[in-house]
Image (spheres, rainbow, N blue to C red):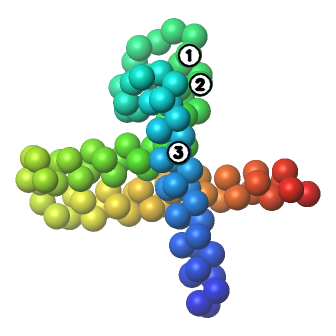
Amino acid sequence: MYHDLLVYIYAITTGFVFGGVIGSFFQLVTGKRIKFELLMEGGPIVVFTAMVLVLAGPIIVMRNAIKAQFIEHRPGHWLALSTLICALWSFMSGIFVLSFALALRA
């Protein structure tokens, strides 16, 4: 059971870190901070932006949740719920990234 928990934590961490790397790379290349509103801009880059947002979504959710907690003074349960959503999203992203890495290795 302890080993399973470590695997889950590893997948969550992998997804969150990969999302941060993707978000930072996007900002480096485009000069724009990654946010969900980028999908509204349209144009041919929308497909690329959507793929980036799928992987960097947990970073955006946590950034917005922390900002809402400390600037807008929202209740603490909003931050807890956002953290849960971020953890689940990071877990799924982490499983995708780890599966892809293992497929490349084989």
**In the image, which disc is placed on residue 48?**
2
* Percent coordinates x, y for residue 23 in the rendering: 47, 39
In the rendered structure, find residue 71 and report the number of the disc placed on it.
none
Question: Disc 3 designates what residue?
Answer: 21
Residue 45 circle label: 1
Which residue lies at the image location 8% right of the left edge and 53% below the top edge? Answer: 73
Q: Earlier in the sequence, mark 1 or mark 3?
A: 3
Residue type pointed to by label 2: Phe
> In the figure, is residue 63 to the left or right of 89?
left
Residues at marks 2 and 1, CA–CA distance in whole angstroms: 5 Å
Q: Is residue 32 above or below residue 74?
A: above
Q: Position of residue 81 (x, y in %)?
A: 30, 61
Point 41% across, 32% down: residue: 34
Q: Position of residue 38 (x, y in %)?
A: 41, 23
Mark 2 and mark 3 in contact (Cβ < 8 Å)? no
Q: Of helix, strand and loop, which one carries label 1?
A: loop
Disc 1: CA contacts within 10 A as few (<14), some (14-19) or many (>=20): few
Q: Which kind of residue does numbered mark 1 sit on?
A: Ile
Q: Residue at x 53, y 19 (%)?
A: 46
Amino acid found under the numbered disc labelled 3? Val
User: Is there a contact, CB below 8 Å, between mark 1 and mark 3?
Assistant: no
On-image quarter of the N terminus = bottom right
Alpha-carbon span between mark 3 and mark 2 = 16 Å
Q: For residue 64, what is the image quadrant?
A: top left
Q: Residues within 10 Å of mark 3 (few under 14, many from 20)?
A: some
Are discs 2 and 1 less than 8 Å apart at CB? yes
In-front residue for pair 18/93? 18
Q: Secondary structure at mark 3?
A: helix
Q: 10 Å neighbourhood of mark 2: few (<14), some, or many (≥20)?
A: few
Give the x, y percent position of residue 101: 76, 54
Between discs 3 and 2, the one toward the N terminus: 3
Instruction: Indicate left or right for 25 with 94 as reference.
Output: left
